[in-house]
Amino acid sequence: MTDATTPVPRGRILVVDDQRNMRATTALLLKQAGYTVSESATGEEALDLLARERVDLLLTDLKMEPMDGLTLLRRALEVAPRLQVIMMTAFGSIESAVEAMRLGAYDYVTKPFKEGELLYRVERALERAKLQAAVDNFATEFAERHGLSALVGRSPAMRELTTRLVRVAQSDATVLIQGESGTGKELVARALHAHSRRSKQPFVPVNCAAISETLLESELFGHAKGAFTGAVKARRGLFEEADNGTLFIDEVTETSPTFQSKLLRTLQDGEVRRVGESTALRVDVRIAAATNRDIELEVKEKRFRQDLYYRLNVVLLRVPPLRERLEDVPALAQHFLDRANTRSPRTRRLSAAAVDHLMTYRFPGNVRELENLVEQAAALAEGDELLPEDFPLRPQGRVLPDVPPPPEATGLPPTDAAPRPTGAEASGPTLAEVVEDAERRAIVQALERHGVDLARVADELGVSSTTLWRKMKRLNLRPPAGARE
């Protein structure tokens, strides 16, 4: 039982310093303020304690032997990723303290420090730890409550997606899901259905790119007996199968204008007419459509009906590519490894070095590529711990030379440089110019390697052929003679 005069523990702090007097003095000050404090004289001792006990805040000196504070910081965050860290440093080592914050430290304090300054920084760090724990708990509960556990990731981009998804799920509004191949558009559609009022009814997916146009019409709308060769009996279409539920139409931009016209009529009327029949059937279906293309460009280029686009794009859900949420890679990799472990007699684990290795990659194949890499590593690795060499990453074609090749070397016309700013702004290129120059050099190099085969150029650069054409036009890069998509 706690006496009224006994201070209630306010947080668990680990003080690490190889100077005994400094370590003991700092620990005493924190204990008197009501904190539960442990001490370690070396980085190895600290790591051993972190592996055994829960610690909210690590307060460590920068200059220590044999393990310095920066090394301890990196290794401590591998053991406890949510750990708050404050670096203690001498006045002359401010640059190292800033580097520590870049590596994940929350704050730093210069020695000698005043009692009030230290306690203030410690209190702020522990408040942040509590807030972060609350956010993590809320995210877990949110995923379980809304059927979003399959959408792994807590990056800002994924939080925005899941928030928007939950808002629209309860309505019957038609949803357009846009994202590159491999980002998980069908998972988003399934989560949308799981949280809707139709969750107990069927979820029916169809991939338009995998079915020929002739069969697609029959697949979606059904057909009467004898409607065409091989139609030996009447068949219900997927619209009827999804009645009262959700129909997920994947790769909708792969369809022809003729089919788009029929789909539009069905969405407008809420009725389907089987191929070969004259009577219409009422259906109550929530539509989720998806595409990996720039659908607005498809409309502009007259490849996709504008009226159908507006019918589908009532609410847009954009699924971010993995390169825009690399902070989710560790959680995704662990998710896929846990799933692989359930199918294997051996239990594998990810090393911190392997995670760091994966974080340097751009993932042109998105989440699907990461899943493939993890499953392959789990199946082929020699040891139980997965190492960087167990993840062979394919060349990305994004390492650029310092100087771009001359236009005459590629047969491409020179481009007009943007006007340079004057005065104080003329000290260096703008961010837009840097990005534009990098894109131009990447495309020129890929064209040198693949010549007229623009499909291979687009694949190497990790973009669609349509996006490649659009970028080349914007950058005033003329396709080589005889170029083919």
Image: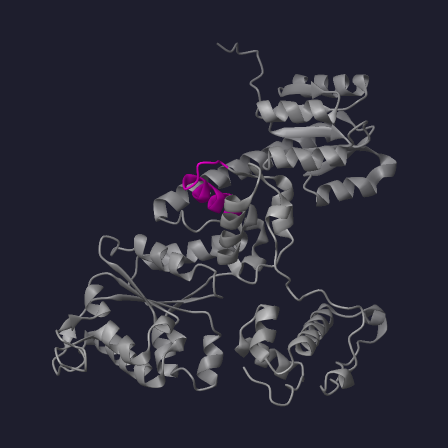
User: What is the quadrant of residue 214 in the picture?
Assistant: bottom left
Work out which quarter of the rendered image holds the C terminus and state it.
bottom right
Measuring 60% from the left and 47% from the top, which residue is drawn there?
A: 390
Marks counted in the figure total 0
Task: Answer left or right for 220 relative to 382.
Answer: left
Task: Answer left or right for 269 relative to 206.
Answer: left
Magenta stretch encompasses residue 262: no
Colour style of the rendered protein structure: one colour
**Image spot of residue 59 (x, y percent):** 70, 29
Which residue of the protein is positioned furthest toward the bottom in this rendering?
481
**Image spot of residue 22 (x, y percent):** 80, 20
Magenta residues (range): 331-347
Measuring 40% from the left and 76% from the top, which residue is drawn there?
A: 253
Measuring 49% from the left and 80% from the top, which residue is drawn there?
A: 297
Magenta stretch encompasses residue 339: yes
Q: Nearer the viewer, residue 199 or 180?
A: 180
Magenta stretch, main secondary structure, is helix
